[in-house]
């Protein structure tokens, strides 16, 4: 999160599920859009923003379980070829909020492989934060959708019931 | 069985496209659909709106939401089976997010002599009851005379800040 936060300027950042809380603690701006209640939608939501506003870079902070629910979105994004689109997948191998059940085919599958196969311009896996930090500036210059697969540890943040958001608050994330 | 007063007839694709333009549609987010394939062919050719294909209907809904955030006016074009497939996104994105989102839903396989909810095919029969359950307003376009409903539906989506659906009763010509 710190690595991304240090590069944050005018990007629209779409976050989802487990990623939302730690990102919000780091960097909450009016350009943060949070997706809850429909797992897997963050990437195409971000794509919509990117296609509507090609002048604004879009970062999607996705989860491995979330992306697994909408793998077809990789094809949709690659086909649409958004130019300034960074798709970050936090790959911790589990469905963190629901009790750390394993993501399917964990240990054998690669989101980078899936993204490359779908037609992303570039896809890179990082096993340590130092290498990610050293590589990110170059990746942000790539013209086309880029996927970054970050190998991380579970946060152990189980789902907690929250009070229903009033309509006015729900509308804010627009 | 309830017979409709007159059988549904095909709406020419060009007529529908013009109505969508008048309604201010800037982007069409679509999953391929046999029912309106002639319209899709026109949409892919026109310079007046952008055609964006998605792999699933879930993606079409979230992508359209992102477009709206960015100031565009999208149409989500899907089939009745796709409506059933994206129910959670209809709820969690279009409704809970209060997005003025216009859907165009093709009723593939509909017996044009019968009202949709009186059709034998469950894909046709359950479309209107599902929209009723979710409180989503809809308009059945059963022929060229109904074309004015396109602008009405778009206006309503914006006024209510929520989804509104157009049901295409017969395959477009």
Image: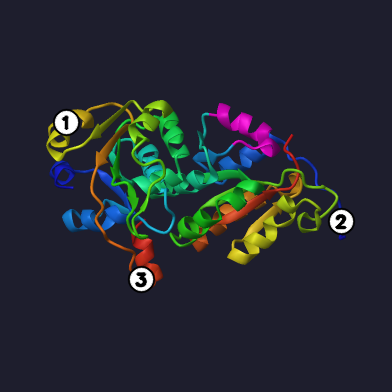
Left or right, B33 with respect to A54, comes to: right
Q: Could you say which is closer to the camera, residue A98 or residue B15? A: A98
Q: Chain of mark 3?
A: A
Q: Which residue is mark 3?
A: A161
Check residue B5 in the rendering and tell me which mark sits there, or answer none.
2
How far apart are labels 3 and 1 at the CA level?
38 Å
Question: Subunit of mark 1?
Answer: A
Which x, y percent locates residue A66?
A: 39, 48
- Assign a secondary structure to mark 2: loop
Crowd rating for badge 1 (residues with CA inside 10 Å; few <14, some 14–19, many 20+)? few
Q: Which residues are magenta?
A: B32-46
Is A99 left or right of B36, judged from the image as shown?
A: left
Image quadrant in which you'd find residue A43 = top left
Residue B36 colored in magenta in the image: yes
Checking the image for residue A135, the label placed there is 1
Mark 2 crowdedness (10 Å alpha carbons): few <14, some 14-19, many ≥20? few
- The number of discs equals 3
Q: Are marks 3 and 1 in contact (CB under 8 Å)?
A: no
């Amino acid at each position: 999160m710190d690595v991304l936060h240090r590069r944050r300027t005018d990007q629209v950042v779409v976050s989802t599920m487990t990623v939302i809380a730690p990102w919000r603690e780091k960097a909450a701006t009016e350009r943060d859009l949070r997706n809850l209640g429909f797992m897997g939608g963050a990437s195409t939501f971000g794509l919509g923003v990117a296609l509507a506003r090609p002048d604004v870079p879009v970062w999607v902070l996705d989860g491995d379980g979330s992306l697994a629910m909408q793998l077809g979105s990789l094809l949709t994004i690659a086909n649409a070829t958004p130019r300034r689109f960074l798709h970050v997948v936090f790959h911790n191998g589990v469905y963190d909020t629901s009790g750390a059940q394993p993501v399917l085919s964990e240990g054998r599958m690669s989101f980078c492989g899936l993204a490359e196969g779908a037609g992303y311009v570039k896809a890179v896996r990082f096993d340590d934060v130092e290498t990610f930090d050293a590589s990110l500036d170059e990746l942000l210059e790539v013209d086309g959708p880029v996927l970054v697969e970050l190998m991380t540890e579970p946060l152990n943040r189980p789902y907690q019931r929250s009070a229903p958001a009033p309509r006015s608050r729900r509308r804010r994330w627009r | 069985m309830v017979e409709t007063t007159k059988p549904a007839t095909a709406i020419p694709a060009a007529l529908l496209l013009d109505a969508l333009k008048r309604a201010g549609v800037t982007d069409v987010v679509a999953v391929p659909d046999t029912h309106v394939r002639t319209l899709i062919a026109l949409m892919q050719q026109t310079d007046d709106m952008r055609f964006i294909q998605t792999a699933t209907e879930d993606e079409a809904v979230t992508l359209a939401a992102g477009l709206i955030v960015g100031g565009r006016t999208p149409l989500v074009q899907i089939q009745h089976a796709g409506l059933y497939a994206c129910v959670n996104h209809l709820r969690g994105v279009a409704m809970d997010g209060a997005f003025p989102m216009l859907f165009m839903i093709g009723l593939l396989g509909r017996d044009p002599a019968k009202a949709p909810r009186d059709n034998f095919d469950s894909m046709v029969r359950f479309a209107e009851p599902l929209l009723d359950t979710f409180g989503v307003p809809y308009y059945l376009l059963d022929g060229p005379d109904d074309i004015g409903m396109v602008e009405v539906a778009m206006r309503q989506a914006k006024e209510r800040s929520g989804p509104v659906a157009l049901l295409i009763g017969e395959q477009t010509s």
